[in-house]
Image (spheres, grey):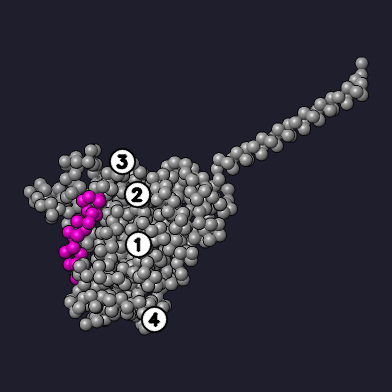
Amino acid sequence: MEPTKTMFSWLETCLLSLFSLIILISFISFKWVKSGSKTKKNLPPSPSKLPIIGNLHQLRSSPVRSLHAFSKKHGPLILMHFGRVPMLIASSAEAAKEIMKTHDLKFSNRPKLRIPDKLIYSSGDITFSPYGEFWRQVKSIAVVHLLNTARVHSFRQVRENEIGLMIDTIAKGHDSLVDLSELTFWLVNNIVCKVCFGRSCQGLKLTNLLERFVHVLGALCVGDYLPWLSWVDRLSGLEDKACKVAKDFDEFLEGVIEEHLEKRKEGDDHSEEDQDFVDTLLDIQRDNTIGFALQRDSIKAIILDVFAAGTDTTYASLVWSISELIRHPRVMNKLQQEVAEVAQGRSMIYENDLEKMVYLKATIKETFRLYPPIPLIPRESMQDVKVMEYDIPAGTQTIINAWAIGRDPNLWEEPDEFRPERFLNNSIDYKGLHFELLPFGAGRRGCPGVQFAIVMYELALANVIYKFDLSLPNGVEGKDLDMSVKNSITLHKKSPLLVIATPRF
């Protein structure tokens, strides 16, 4: 029996209705899911990216400037993707404040990175160790036994002696060419070494080792963002360089520790006042005064942290300050007048004089604004958190672009100009309470060595400017000084600062 026309019509109607129902349910489900996802995750704006590599190819030769350009286009808080890793970029004081103050605890972690792991004993130092009890303990050791106000003051004689030696070295040049980059490196390094190791550490080998360390530490490790392409780091030689630097530094640090242990065996005991930082760490290890065993690798990681960070960032900032003063004779003259008035004809500037030098402090703040020692400050979120109304998932790597904040035209008038006067009637400071100026970071993960670094910086700069008139060789004018930046984890001047230093009296 053949189906009737009515049956065909009924079947057609049922199929059409079913198809329409499926489409309607799919449409409603899609809208619901889309709406629900928006409700759950209101992510920051993101620049367009390529499959697999994300935005990695857009960092180019200067990550600091590349990220700044993206922030100007997409806003102060953006979400980029470095390979498979989401990366939150904060480029305004408001965004930095939310991350480093309002939600400081939630952003107190450091991302786990391969190169610091290789270089610094599985990131067992203060800077790169993950947030937790171990980090709290090693930071406390450094602060209590090296970086607190009383201990920093106790190293005054070391600082003044070393600065006096540097001034004598420059004066003996008799108007010849002086490499101030090299001299300031050895000044800061000698102070740090005498405080940490009880002796200076002169030698080209050590200079080269620290340069290699900083270079490798700041290199882009592809395997951190695309693990299946980690072979690229081996092919480029990055992993081998990191392993070689780690081995060389380990040999140096082992030698320092063994030297101290040998002196103890010989009965060369030190009073508490005479102890250097290595002696203190060995006492803590022996007496087990922190609640857990301080391993030998942990001692070396802490020493390496203080040694490398204490030297590299401070001398880099000194070079930037002197370079800008040479480029701006008006500022140089004003600063020389101030230090001369305070010194009143004495042979050098002493630490007691520094508090009277308002323009010196303004000059240093202006240097930090334009050249923050660590221009990109890393953090990582430990929990889901809302920043500037955007939803940030746990585990999001985060970068605060201190360089971009220091050049934000919404915060600073003529931001590219070197003008210390902007800080003369301005309460903004660099100690982590003002997010317009972040040379040392802020919050829990802010640098604990601010006092240690600043007193070296102020004293050295004041004395160099007090004792010498500085000019460029071959009649080159200050405005033509090369101020290009070396691509590194620390903001360094690319070319050495070569000057003619003429004694002022």
Helix, strand or loop: magenta stretch: helix
> x, y percentage for residue 59?
50, 57
Residue nearest the viewer, comparing 136 with 420: 420
Sequence-wise first label, 3 or 1? 3
Residue 128 rendering spot, x and y as whole percentages: 35, 48
Q: Nearer the viewer, mark 3 or mark 4?
A: 3
Q: Residues within 10 Å of mark 3 (few under 14, many from 20)?
A: few
Determine which residue is flagged by label 1. 429
Residue linked to disc 4: 477
Quadrant that contains the N terminus? top right
Task: Give me the C-alpha separation between circle 3 and circle 4.
Answer: 53 Å
Residue 163 forms part of the magenta stretch: yes
Q: Are marks 3 and 1 in contact (CB under 8 Å)?
A: no
Q: Residues within 10 Å of mark 2 (few under 14, many from 20)?
A: some
Q: Secondary structure at mark 4?
A: loop
Write down the region rendered in magenta.
142-164
- Furthest residue to the left? 267
**Image-based side of 50 in relation to 365, left or right:** right
For this view, does 36 lie left or right of residue 134? right
Task: Name the residue that disc number 2 marks.
Answer: 444
Q: Callout 3, which amino acid?
A: Glu
- Mark 4, Cα crowd under 10 Å, few <14 / some 14-19 / many 20+, is few
Q: CA distance from mark 3 to mark 1?
A: 30 Å
Q: Residue at x 55, y 43 (%)?
A: 41
Q: Residue at x 55, y 40 (%)?
A: 40
Residue 318's quadrant in the figure?
bottom left
Quadrant containing the C terminus in the rendered view: bottom left
The residue carrying mark 3 is 133
Q: Secondary structure at mark 2?
A: helix
